[in-house]
Amino acid sequence: MNDLISIIVPVYNVEKYLDQCIESILNQSYQKLEIILVDDGSTDNSGLICDKYKKRDKRIQVIHKKNGGQSSARNYGLNIAKGCYIGFVDSDDWIEQNMYEILHENICLYDADIATCSYILEYKEISMSVATFKKPTVKIFEKKDKKMLLKSFLNHKLYFSGPCDKLYRKNIFNNIRFPENQFYEDNYIALEVILKAERIVVGDGKYYHYRQNINSTTKSYSEKKYQDAIKAEMHNIEIVKHFYPDLVKCAYAPLYLRYFQFLDLLIFDPDSSSEAIQPIRSNIQNNIKNIMFLENLNIKEKIALAMMAANLSLYKKVRLLQKKSRGY
């Protein structure tokens, strides 16, 4: 356990949650850590909280910078990190005490470039684990298996785009940085990272707690969010076309799900207009035949997209009933 792990934490206006996040990192069973808190121009007490912890633990360094967004903060941390390995924790989340010990063991045991775990979605009153296997285990993906892993990613299974449930060898980020001033930046670089890694260990232990916020990026519509999301999906489609052209059909499923995501947001937005709704709906309508034959969309997703294409009023009624039954 002599390898230094650099943990990069972008911090912006999270004074309510920051103590829990930092404490969970400080209390890791794997202790050889460099903890980089990047205060991205916070206007609340987050910066002061960071400074408090810096005085308490010499493993912590604090960077105060002008607000530039989460990608900018992560990239700043990557530029100064001294560790052999890189981890990311979002400042409103927290992690299990043995998370980095287990990820480090897996990455060393299998001589991997990336080790992943599963995560738990944390709502105000409930926790919901996101896991693929019925019991904790790992799967090893080498170069010869890369196509299988890529297909799992496109099927939104096994390997997810977010960086916080992973430990990376630092050299994975040579010549790779998160795109700045852009939403859905995780998704934009996900395939680049997968293709660069020689071996990936995909684990199902649930060690990362991902706090769900009703004000998060995915819960509200803006034209920029929509355009950035589509840009990321098209970027991934071009990568698949180049490296695995026989998977191109699968690569379109995440794009159609983005159309679904943003049209759903607009339908329930009282300020939305037909000018915003119709272009997204047209993209679904124009591709509905392809959508129905995609193997990596499940039947519920296909039914929802078909309803969106055929009758938005019916779709909205069904969704309202669904939300009511779930107590939303």
Image: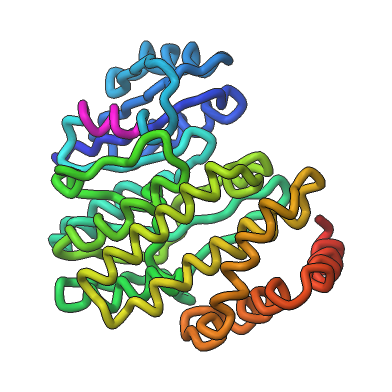
Q: Residue at point 13% right, 61% down?
A: 111
Return the residue nearer the eye: 138 or 223. 223
Residue 227 magenta-highlighted: no
Q: Position of residue 223 (x, y in %)?
A: 58, 44
Return the residue nearer the eye: 31 or 152. 152
Q: How many marks?
A: 0
Q: Outermost residue, front direction?
A: 275
Q: Quadrant location of residue 187?
A: bottom left
Return the residue nearer the eye: 301 or 82. 301
What secondary structure is the magenta-colored segment mainly? helix
Q: Is residue 1 visible?
A: no
Q: Position of residue 290 (x, y in %)?
A: 51, 83
Q: Vertical placement of 16 versus 217: above or below? A: above
Over which residues does the magenta segment extend?
A: 74-80
Is residue 260 found left or right of 62 in the rendered image?
Answer: right
Q: Residue at point 37% right, 65% down?
A: 159
Q: Position of residue 188 (x, y in %)?
A: 36, 52
